[in-house]
Structure formats: structure tokens, C-alpha cells
Image: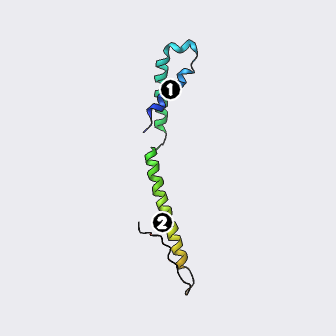
Amino acid sequence: MIDLNHLDDLARRLSGLVPAGLRESREELQENFKAVLQSGLSKLDLVTREEFDVQRAVLLRTREKLEALEALVQQLERPAGTPVEASGVDITH
């Protein structure tokens, strides 16, 4: 979801850049700027911060599991008779 407060602020700033002769229609320009910005942003393939944070957490857990599995593979690949140390990492979750 796009934060409309940021769009309002950006539209206000854009309308403030309009030359003085056109400022009578400032509110109309501001609304047009906002509509164009909303339309453009809605076409982008964006995710919310919440969705990003959830996927980041999933990726971190996956990385931890991968590292634990890599350590386990290294232990299993050791020659017979070499002592095997416990990794201390639980890969079941």
C-alpha cells in the first residue's frame, strides 16, 4: 500500500514549482500531480515494508538452515575414524 501522505506532500511541492502566472489553478494542479503519481506508482511492482520484512526473515531462517546443512555435509564427508563434532544447530525448524 502506498502512503498517500507522501504523495500529497510531493504533489504540494510540485505545484509549488509552478510559475506564478499559473498558480490560480494550484489546487487543480496539485490534484493532477497526485493522480499521476498514484497511477505511475501503482504500475510498479512494489511490495509493502511489511511484506519485505516477512520475506527477509524467511530468507534469514533459510540461510541458517543452509549453513547447518553445509556443516553436516562436511562432517559426513570426513574420512572414517575422524571424530565428528556436534554442530549445535537444529535444522528441523
Q: Amino acid at mark 1?
A: Ala
Q: Which residue is mark 1?
A: 11
Q: Secondary structure at mark 1?
A: helix
Q: CA distance from mark 1 to mark 2?
A: 46 Å
Of residues 46 and 79, which is closer to you in this image? 79
Q: Where 79 sits versus 87, above or below? A: below
Q: Which residue is mark 2?
A: 65
Task: Residue 56: give x, y in percent of width and height.
Answer: 48, 53
Q: Residue at x 48, y 72 (%)?
A: 88
Q: Amino acid at mark 2?
A: Lys
Dot 2 crowding, Cα within 10 Å, few <14, some 14–19, many 20+? some
Q: Residue at x 50, y 66 (%)?
A: 66
Q: Residue at x 50, y 12 (%)?
A: 24
Q: Secondary structure at mark 2?
A: helix
Please indicate whether residue 92 sits to the left or right of residue 63 in the image: left
Colouring? rainbow
Task: Residue 8: give x, y in percent of width and height.
Answer: 47, 28
Q: Where 59 sits versus 28, above or below? A: below
Specify which label sits upstream in the sequence, 1 or 2.
1
Task: Residue 51: give x, y in percent of width and height.
Answer: 43, 48
Badge 1 vs badge 2, beta-carbon distance below 8 Å = no
In what quadrant of the picture does the C terminus appear? bottom left
